[in-house]
Amino acid sequence: MLFPNLPTKTLGGSFFWDTLDRRRGWKLQKNIITDHYRILDPENVRQAWSNDHAEMLHAFGKFTSGSGE
């Protein structure tokens, strides 16, 4: 389940985050402590977050497909 999101500026994942995929400036990351996921846009603003890997892969595909930007 994607959690409610307020777009929040981040530092881009310098600490506590593994970048699992990177496309068109977008990043799919996993927190190394809590195991939750987030999607950052090219400006390092969090656009989505969840604890469901499959759902985040789907959302990441939608963000990076080019149809929504």
Image (cartoon, grey):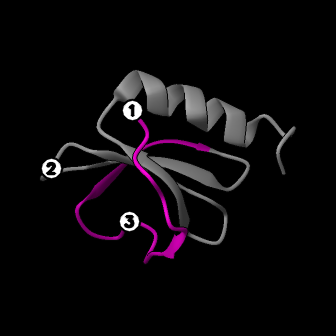
How far separated are the C-alphas under marks 3 and 1?
22 Å
SS class, disc 3: loop
Q: Amino acid at mark 1?
A: Met
Residue holding disc 2: 34
Name the residue at 47% across, 33% down. Answer: 56
Characterize the local packing of mark 1: few (<14), some (14-19) or many (20 or more) Cα atoms within 10 angstroms.
few
Characterize the local packing of mark 2: few (<14), some (14-19) or many (20 or more) Cα atoms within 10 angstroms.
few
- Toward the viewer: 8 or 41? 8
Secondary structure mainly formed by the magenta segment: loop
Q: Which residue extends farthest top? A: 54
Residue 59: percent from the left, percent from the top? 58, 34
How far separated are the C-alphas under marks 1 and 2?
16 Å
Q: Amino acid at mark 2?
A: Thr
52 lies left or right of 20 = left
Residue holding disc 3: 13
Characterize the local packing of mark 3: few (<14), some (14-19) or many (20 or more) Cα atoms within 10 angstroms.
some
Residue 60 position by quadrant: top right
Magenta run includes residue 57: no
Residue 29: percent from the left, percent from the top? 40, 48
The residue mark sitting in front, 3 or 1, is 1
The residue mark sitting in front, 3 or 2, is 2
Residue 62: percent from the left, percent from the top? 70, 33
SS class, disc 1: loop
The residue mark sitting in front, 1 or 2, is 1
Magenta run includes residue 5: yes
- Among the two numbered marks 1 and 2 on one chain, the one whose residue lies closer to the N terminus: 1
Residue holding disc 1: 1
How far separated are the C-alphas under marks 3 and 2?
14 Å
| Magenta segment | 1-22
SS class, disc 2: loop
